[in-house]
Structure formats: structure tokens, C-alpha cells
Image (cartoon, grey):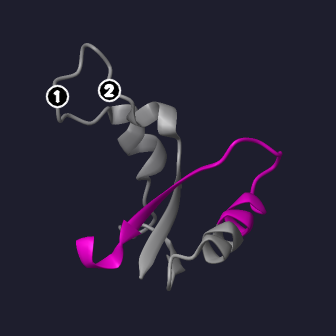
């Protein structure tokens, strides 16, 4: 099973002034914002393209405008 979450890919890029392996604070405050200490994900049971497209559509439906959408998939066993 996979867990899916929308991210802002540009915030995760390695900046020349940040040490290798360090994470930008912008990525943490933007993409890892929590509510009551919980981080929300969408579940993708089999990780098929159709299922990922459905999750992307569900995530996009909550946005105010049509725009590029970056999604990260994490294997549930990695959490």
C-alpha cells in the first residue's frame, strides 16, 4: 500500500547554501504542516496508475485553480 501527499517539489530542491542531506525549512513549513500533530495522506492500495490518477484528482478538487500538482508516494512500510 502507498500513501500519497501533495507537495511543492520546488521547495525540496537542494539549494547550494544548504548542506547535503539537510531539508529546507520552506519544505517543512509548507508541505509537512500538521493539524493536531497529524499529517494527512491519501491511501493507494495497489499503486496502480488509475488509483494514483484518482487520488491526484481528489487532491486537485480541493484547489482553487487548475495548476501543476506534485504528489509524493511513500510505501506504507516505510513510515
Q: How many marks?
A: 2
Name which residue lies at 74% across and 65% down. 57
Name which residue lies at 36% across and 43% down. 28
Q: Which residue is mark 2?
A: 14
**Alpha carbon distance from label 1 to label 2:** 8 Å
Question: Callout 2: helix, strand or loop?
Answer: loop
Q: Position of residue 65 (x, y in %)?
A: 83, 45
Q: Residues within 10 Å of mark 1 (few under 14, many from 20)?
A: few
Marks 1 & 2, CB-CB < 8 Å contact: yes
Residue occupying the far right of the picture: 65
Position of 28 with respect to 70 (left or right) is left
Q: Is any part of residue 6 visible from this angle?
A: yes
Magenta-colored span: 56-79
Q: Earlier in the sequence, mark 1 or mark 2?
A: 2
Magenta segment: does it hold 32? no
Q: Which residue is mark 1?
A: 20
Q: Image height check: is 11 above or below 47?
A: above
Question: Callout 1: helix, strand or loop?
Answer: loop
Nearest the viewer among 47 and 41 is 47
Q: Position of residue 61 (x, y in %)?
A: 78, 63
Amino acid at each position: 500500500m502507498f500513501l500519497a501527499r501533495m507537495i511543492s517539489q520546488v521547495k525540496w530542491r537542494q539549494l547550494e547554501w544548504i548542506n547535503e542531506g539537510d531539508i529546507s525549512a520552506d519544505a517543512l513549513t509548507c508541505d509537512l504542516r500538521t493539524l493536531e500533530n497529524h499529517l494527512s495522506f491519501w491511501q493507494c492500495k495497489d499503486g496502480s496508475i488509475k488509483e494514483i490518477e484518482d487520488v491526484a484528482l481528489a487532491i486537485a478538487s480541493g484547489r482553487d485553480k487548475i495548476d501543476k500538482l506534485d504528489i509524493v508516494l511513500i510505501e506504507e512500510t516505510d513510515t
